[in-house]
Image: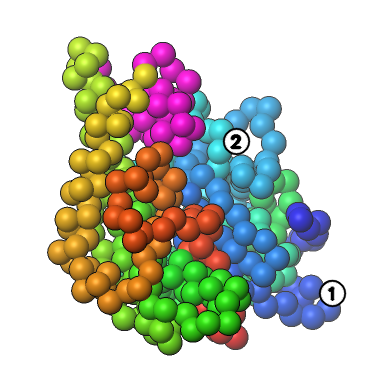
Amino acid sequence: MNKSISVVPGPYQITAVNGRERTVAVGLAVGNHAIKLSTTQQSYVIRSQSLDYHPDLVSGTDSLLLGKAIETDIFDGQLAVGKGLDTYNGVQTLAYGLKGELYARYALLAIAYAVDNGATVELAVSLPTSQMRPLIEPLQGSHVVEVNGQTKAFTVAAISFFPEGLGAATRMRELKLQRSTQPVPSFAALDFGGGNCSVVGLDQNGKVSGFAQTTPGVLALYADIASAVAADNGGIAPTDDAIRLGVELGTCRIGGYGRTDFRTIYDDALPKWISSRLSEIQAKAGDILDRSSVKVVCGGGAHLPGLMSHLPNDYVQANNPQQLESQGLLEYAKRMS
């Protein structure tokens, strides 16, 4: 359930909630497809796309965050992040080398929406690459941000970094422990992300038995489809995002509801993309997979129509595959206090 949000009186200071300091554990992963955030109260999945202004006649929701910087070094002015922004001028995504620039902005706005005013945040995040760490570290500190019409003052007290996919693997192991009295077998989480594919293995005791990452991810599939569509339409290529929308909505039409149907191209491109990904995954993470009794597919790419039919029979699809990563990272955030 959404919780009511108190407005901070000026001057803006971090204050205790109901007279007491409140520490909130937050698990967060910002991917090319979505921002995944979990607290003990709720999980959110928010589209990773943004505008540096607020569209007219649009209201903020759980899936569309309208932010304004008040006292923060992370961004200036206005920021809109979430669904429904595809048709506006100036929309930005993480797909074109902007992840380093936008990751912290998206993270800050999502945290501001999810926590109460006056909160002290213990943050566990997935780290796409080691080069991203200094770009995420500025989140640590105090911030005042307006989000969806409410003003939030909060402090990120500490940040812990974890490899992509570890949160999903940890959460799946936890769910197995909750549902069965039998020993949990070793398993691997195969995370199909937008920019890369990650494999994390956990042994029977829940310890990391291996980690590997390959590139590219699902965005390469969209680029291949866009190129094929262009070849069939006199060289006029749709954007990768227009292809993504058609795939995510299940219509296989450009932009989701356009006139051009690319289903035949998708059906041809998908097995080729999967084959290339599995070949590289086997080369880099074959030992992890071979040691794992259970292999689970997660991440935004787990929703690709027809994906599972092209994977080996011993792979299974996770429920709520995008939320697993932030839910698992939340368990690590809880241990930080």
Left or right, 172 with reference to 261: right
Instruction: Please give the residue where the numbered disc 2 appears in the rendered image.
Output: 54
Q: What stretch of residues is rendered in magenta?
A: 236-260
Q: Does the image show residue 169?
A: yes
Rendered residue at 66%/32% (across/down): 58
Residue 243 magenta: yes
According to the image, label 1 marks what residue? 18
Percent x, y for residue 42?
Answer: 67, 61
Height in image: 246 above or below 317? above
Q: Was residue 198 drawn as part of the magenta stretch in this picture?
A: no
Taking the spot 79% from the left edge, 73% from the top edge, the residue there is 17
**How dense is the environment of label 1, judged by Cα within 10 Å: few (below 14), some, or many (20 and up)?**
few
Q: Number of callouts in the render?
A: 2
Q: Say which residue appears at 26% left-offset and 22% top-offset.
A: 229
* Secondary structure of residue under mark 1: loop
Tell me which corner region of the image, top left, top right, bottom left or bottom right, holds residue 254. top left
Q: What amino acid is at disc 2? A: His
Camera-side residue of 67 and 305: 305
